[in-house]
């Protein structure tokens, strides 16, 4: 199989590229090459900025691909560009959308691919919906061989998966735990959430590549395991070898007192219970099973980050914000009690 990935070195795509190369795939990465140390050995680099359409067109002029996948498109204009570039260059075009595009709030917590797409809380999700609409129009009217993939919360060894963190990532929350400081959990921590390790996601994704039954279809790829946010934070604390000191804060309050996009990432996503039905994926990829439990995957991630100091990016502004939020809640309790 000859495949081209636009991107290819992110949280989701890295595991896919590694597994494909192990299987002998003729893999090309269209990438700016800014992180050459992360480019997998054996992949062919087409070094370019995908936004430079003329340059990219020249690079792919002599190529034909079985699969082209865009991991970094977020708005319809980027898919319009992809259509111009690849409409005669590939047998299958895979767009990585998002499970946050599903109806929010849900009318039924069990999510299938037939769940309506609607998210009034998050522009990111609405843009992904618009991208899907554009591509499916090209499939219906022009025969463009589209497959849409919807990941949910997919993580790797690079970052601890969390609900509430700052703009610099998740390490500061782990550092607060190590220091014996309280950490914020949105809501009451009992809503159900689904986390998928990137290597499990890769198995499902690769099974859709070159799969004739996936053309014209939208498919989500997630684990079948559902856990609460309280359980997730307990797992992280256990992996760090410290007790969990949790403070539960309403998601609406977090959104109101932060410059982070908690309206989108919490109210439009993580504050809601989500349980995915993966029956469609398993029909298309019969041997797909997500085998990494949340406790196993998070422990592995924590150990990797502790062993690699370069991944421990501190965020003092977020740390101070957490202290202010927790102090404000304590003061509100005292004010009510008199």
Image (spheres, grey):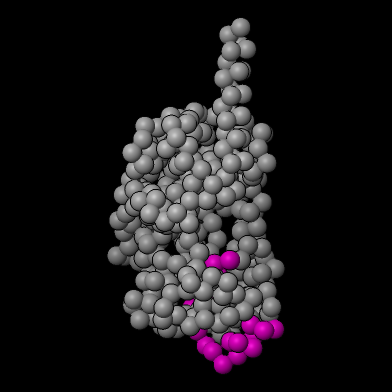
The quadrant of the picture occupied by the N terminus is bottom left
Instruction: Note whether residue 103 is visible.
Output: no
The question of residue 222 being in magenta is answered with no
Left or right of residue 284: residue 271: right
Please determine whether, in this image, residue 180 is positioned above or below residue 142.
Answer: above
The question of residue 58 being in magenta is answered with yes
Left or right of residue 122: residue 98: left
How many numbered markers are drawn?
A: 0
Question: 238 and 64: which one is in front?
Answer: 238
Place of residue 111 in the rendered image (x, y in percent of width and height, measured from the top left): 46, 48
Place of residue 236 in the rendered image (x, y in percent of width and height, measured from the top left): 39, 41
Can you tell which quarter of the image residue 138 is in?
bottom right
Furthest toward the bottom, the residue is 62
Question: 237 and 20: which one is in front?
Answer: 237
The quadrant of the picture occupied by the C terminus is top right
Can you tell which quarter of the image residue 334 is in?
top right
Furthest toward the top, the residue is 338
Left or right of residue 222: residue 51: right
- The residue lying at 36 percent from left, 35 percent from top is 242
Left or right of residue 206: residue 70: right
Instruction: Note whether residue 294 is visible.
Output: yes
Please determine whether, in this image, residue 62 is positioned above or below residue 279.
Answer: below
Place of residue 54 in the rendered image (x, y in percent of width and height, measured from the top left): 70, 84
- The residue lying at 64 percent from left, 88 percent from top is 58
- The residue lying at 60 percent from left, 18 percent from top is 331
- The residue lying at 54 percent from left, 67 percent from top is 71
Question: 38 and 226: which one is in front?
Answer: 38
Please provide the residue range marked out in magenta: 54-72
Place of residue 133 in the rendered image (x, y in percent of width and height, measured from the top left): 63, 63
């Amino acid at each position: 199989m000859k495949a081209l990935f636009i991107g290819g070195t992110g949280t989701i795509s890295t595991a896919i590229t590694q597994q494909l190369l192990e299987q002998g795939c003729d893999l090309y990465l269209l990438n700016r090459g800014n992180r050459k140390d992360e480019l997998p050995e054996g992949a062919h680099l087409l070094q370019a900025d995908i936004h430079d359409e003329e340059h990219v067109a020249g690079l792919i002029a002599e190529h034909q691909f079985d699969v082209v996948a865009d991991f970094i498109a977020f708005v319809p204009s980027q898919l319009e560009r992809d259509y111009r570039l690849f409409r005669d260059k590939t047998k299958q075009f895979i767009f990585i959308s998002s499970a946050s595009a599903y109806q929010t709030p849900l009318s039924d917590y069990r999510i299938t691919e037939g769940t309506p797409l609607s998210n009034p809380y998050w522009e990111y999700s609405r843009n992904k919906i618009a991208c899907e609409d554009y591509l499916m129009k090209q499939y219906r009217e022009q025969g463009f061989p589209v497959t849409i993939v919807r990941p949910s919360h997919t993580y790797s060894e690079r970052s601890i998966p969390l609900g509430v963190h700052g703009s610099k990532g998740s390490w500061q929350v782990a550092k607060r735990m190590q220091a014996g400081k309280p950490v914020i959990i949105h809501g009451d921590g009992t809503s159900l959430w689904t986390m998928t390790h990137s290597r499990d996601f890769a198995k499902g994704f690769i099974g859709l590549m070159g799969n004739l039954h996936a053309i014209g279809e939208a498919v989500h790829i997630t684990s079948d395991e559902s856990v609460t946010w309280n359980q997730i934070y307990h797992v992280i604390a256990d992996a760090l070898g410290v007790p969990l000191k949790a403070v539960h804060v309403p998601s609406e309050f977090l959104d109101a007192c932060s410059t982070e996009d908690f309206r989108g990432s919490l109210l439009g996503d993580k504050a809601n219970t989500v349980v995915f039905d993966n029956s469609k994926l398993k029909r298309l990829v019969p041997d797909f099973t997500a085998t990494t439990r949340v406790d196993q995957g998070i422990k592995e991630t924590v150990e990797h980050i502790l062993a690699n100091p370069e991944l421990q990016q501190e965020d003092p502004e977020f740390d101070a914000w957490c202290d202010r939020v927790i102090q404000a809640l304590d003061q509100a309790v005292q004010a009510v009690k008199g």
